[in-house]
Image: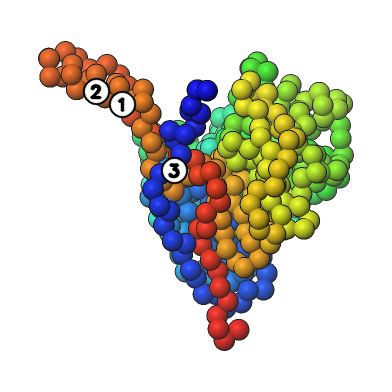
Amino acid sequence: MPRDPLQRYLARGPNPSPVTVAIGSNKGQVRVFPGFTGCFIIPPDGSLWRWGQPGGYQFSRTNLAEQVGTNRDWAQASAANGNCVGVTADGSFWSWGLDFGAPLVSSTFFKNWDSEPKQVGIKRDWAWATSGGSHAVMLKRDGTVWGWGHDSEGQLGNGLGPEETNLVRVLHSQLPHVRTNLVQMGTNDDWTAVSAEPSYTLALRADGTLWMWGKIQRLLNGQPGGVFPVPTRVCRETNWSALQWDGTGLQGMALDGNGGLWRFFNSQPQPSAGADSVGQLFASNCVPGRFALAYPGFWQLHPDGTLWETKVDFSQPPNFKVLNQWHRAGKRSDWIGLWGGMGTAYGVTADGTVWTWGAAWGLEGITSPTSKMHILENRIKGALGFAAKPYSTGGVTPIQREPRPLIIFQSSPSQ
């Protein structure tokens, strides 16, 4: 039998011991926010922790969970292409990493980098913040949606092109020289959830309808997508309940009121068409915070606290399928939370431990055999005086087969 090619990319060597952190109270659940190549973790004391490289390669990589800043009132955080954003319990907004364009101060020049969270503006009416490929989206407590960043593909939903919005000058050789200041997306005040995808925005309204704006790069059938510069209803259903960011190239994902997890887009948005015309039902019986897509499978928590897994057929992309051949994973029955993103699963058990498995973003990539051959070939050519051929030394992300503990949050003895 041929050897499983996955074996050569398994995480090797002993795992580091989990970080143990004493917190003032164990009341309330630890929450995990998967991001681009890593995650943020918020325990009951409101501190913020990171693992991997949430936000992308511009950030340092860590295989040990470490604290971000000193605040202890975080409510939510999001990481994407070099930019991280978050909201604290008092409704203030924070940003770090790459600045998408001084969102609240139009006269400010672009600042390359902030390694620590910085409060942006003085308003305290924000409910949620999400970072995309080159734009960011925020939900206010009054139900309005706002955004800033790159708008050349309609990501900001107020008409195509940054010339129609409040311009911000950007000084960076690798970014467009014109970004947009903070602008309202659409005119409605009944938005309940938003998700900034790489080139578009996905959003829910209070009436249960699903909307998008921006550019669909490619449909699931391989056909070209399209640009939608203003909020456009995705399909006719009115029972959408939550959005699911995944980051594995599955396009936008949303949950319906029956626990169905859908991925989009089979076709362009069609307000009068059914969901099965625009998207695909990917999995059933899904509850927010209790499922994860983590290579190479799909995972769910049962009401009795047990963890279950089934394989996913990745052989015919982009038509991935959950095989529904479930088996119990491990012997623990105290799982209370489960999230997924970028091929990694993050689970929490009742003792305050955060676990991870799947893509091991905290580890350096493993150089593939093909890259090793190109490296050797170029060394030989160099020794003989011949020109080297182009190649990539990019490593393949290792896979963590079994859950391993990342961080343990323990209540203080005085509590």
Is 156 in front, or is 246? 246
Question: What percent of the width, then of the height, locates residue 298?
Answer: 67, 40
Q: Residues within 10 Å of mark 3 (few under 14, many from 20)?
A: many
Give the residue type at disc 3: Ala
Q: Secondary structure at mark 3?
A: loop
* Count of numbered labels shown in the rendering: 3
Question: What percent of the width, then of the height, locates residue 155?
Answer: 62, 35
Residue 138 seen in the current view: no
Q: Residue furthest bottom?
A: 414
Measure the alpha-carbon separation of dots 3 and 1: 18 Å
Residue for badge 1: 372
Residue for badge 3: 11
Residue positioned 77% across, 58% down in the render: 304
Quarter where residue 163 is shown: top right
Task: Look at discs 3 and 2 and give the one toward the viewer.
Answer: 3
Q: Residue furthest front?
A: 1
Q: Secondary structure at mark 1?
A: helix
Residue positioned 55% across, 80% down in the render: 412
Question: What percent of the width, then of the height, locates residue 289?
Answer: 70, 52
Q: Is the Cβ of the residue at disc 2 closer than 8 Å to that at disc 1?
A: yes
Q: Is the Cβ of the residue at disc 3 closer than 8 Å to that at disc 2?
A: no
